[in-house]
Amino acid sequence: MTTTTLFGTGTMKLNLRSGAFALVTALITVLALINAASSGGTATARSKLTLIAPAAPGGGWDGFARESQQALRGNGIVNNPQVVNVPGAGGTIGLSQFVQTPGREDALLVTGGVMIGAIELADNPESMADVVPIAKLADDYAALVVPADSEFQTLDDFLAAWIQNPGGTSIGGGSLGSIDHLLSGLLAKEVGLDPKLVNYVAYSGGGEALTSLLSHTTAAGMSGYNEVADQIEAGSLRALAISSEERLDGVDVPTFKEQGVDVAMSNWRGVVAAPGISDAARAEFTAIITEMRETDDWKDTLARNSWTDSFATGEELEEFIAGEVATAREIVKDLGL
């Protein structure tokens, strides 16, 4: 509801007209408040669903939320889906605020691997244990990239230099605790390098990290493949490896695993509900997201973004999240953070 406040100048005389106007204004305001309260109390996820993206507009979670919004609206699954951005601290600010709305049955919070890393890094008081998992929808993968004119032609070239001089072979990427950061630590441990020695340079945005890489401020970059795909195709960056289990369709980048390095990690994305919702509301949320996932619009979304369909709900999702939390906790400890 938008409230407009009127200001005037000079001396106002109290008269019958102004008194009547004030009375009418007050009545309209009261009626609007009653209507808003009534609508909020009876709103259902099918009539009005709020998707909370715990990141600024333009980021990965924001894009995921807006793609979902379009698929839900375009296929008539939800009448009025809305996206609200609550950025900051790897999604933990949005999580903390969301947890403070127990029983809310008309909103879902976008979440994923980045949030789990941020929770463990900051020892956040709110965690995934405080929300209700609804669905995991997609996996996105990180790529290890270098400038086109880099001396590192292959993954083996980079690893040899990295192991010999980890401090002088820096890796740029997203914020501390991000998938970029965790994957760098996991990669170090796998090749016998102490993760605490990794010279990881964290950037708040992909653009800043890319500029740093192209100017050779950092030796390599770890980034979501989609964020660097254009530069790879244009020939300004070379991808040495991607963090998927197997090669992705349409992506001509070898995996770490096929090059003899047993490392894989996804930047998964999904949605969770507020604590304290009813079983019926959880079932309805699951049905809504399942219907969205089956639409041609969502299949097109997966293809356009090079995301892998990794749909999971219920106990399968709960077990997956528990495993992700344990992995993130171990890597953060190994990194000495």
Image: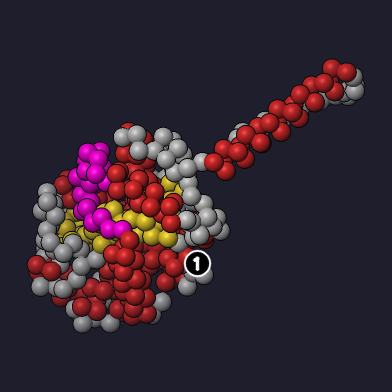
User: Which residue is located at x 51 percent, y 41 percent?
Assistant: 43
Residue 186 spot, x, y in % from top left: 26, 74
Q: Which residue is mark 1?
A: 126
**Residue at the image point whose x is 9% and y is 69% from the top:** 259
Residue pictured at 14% horizontal, 73% vertical: 261
Relative to the observer, which residue lies in front, 219 or 203? 203
Figure disc tally: 1
Q: Residues within 10 Å of mark 1 (few under 14, many from 20)?
A: some
The quarter of the displayed image where residue 323 is located: bottom left
Q: Quadrant of the N terminus?
A: top right
Amino acid bearing label 1: Glu
- In the rendered structure, does residue 159 fall within the stretch colored magenta? no
- Residue at the spot x=17%, y=69% of the render? 158
Q: Is residue 306 above or below residue 242?
A: above
Q: Is residue 239 left or right of residue 53?
A: left
Tell me which segment is drawn in magenta: 293-313
